[in-house]
Image: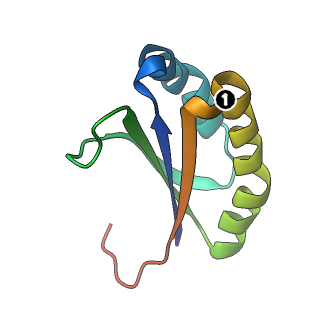
Amino acid sequence: MSLLSITFHTTESISKEWIQYMETDLHQMVENLIDVEKYIMSEVETEMISEGQNTNLLLIFDNEEKRQDFVEIELSNITDRILKEFGQNVMIFKTYLNPKKSRF
């Protein structure tokens, strides 16, 4: 199992547009990902953000090779689409998660 966490930080000025995009376009893109075994898309609730909002996408892959292929190809495409739609109003952060122990 190999995990990837992607966080989308959006400014307040596009919050309505982002919610709509997340529920339609982004969700559809994630549903169509062949190498993703499972995913969780979440709104991030934290006291550390004073403006804007964060959305997190946790992706679960069978192995590190599929995760790396996703990062090199699919994440690049998703990032390009989001930047084209929202410009600098969305920042995208990827985090590689390497489980040491787990129980699903």
Q: Residues within 10 Å of mark 1 (few under 14, many from 20)?
A: few
Nearest the viewer among 90 and 55 is: 90
Q: Is residue 47 left or right of residue 3?
A: left
Is residue 31 positioned above or below 71 on the image? above
Q: Is residue 52 left or right of residue 22?
A: left
The quadrant of the image that shows the C terminus is bottom left
Q: Which residue lies at the image location 52% right of the left edge and 72% below the top edge?
A: 1
Q: Which residue lies at the image location 29% right of the left edge and 43% below the top edge?
A: 49
Q: Is residue 39 left or right of residue 66?
A: left
- Identify the residue under disc 1: 87
Q: Residue furthest bottom?
A: 100
Q: Which residue lies at the image location 35% right of the left edge and 83% below the top edge?
A: 101
The percent position of residue 48, horizontal first and vertical second, equals: 25, 49
Q: Amino acid at mark 1?
A: Gly
Q: Is residue 72 left or right of residue 10?
A: right
Quarter-of-image position of residue 65: bottom right
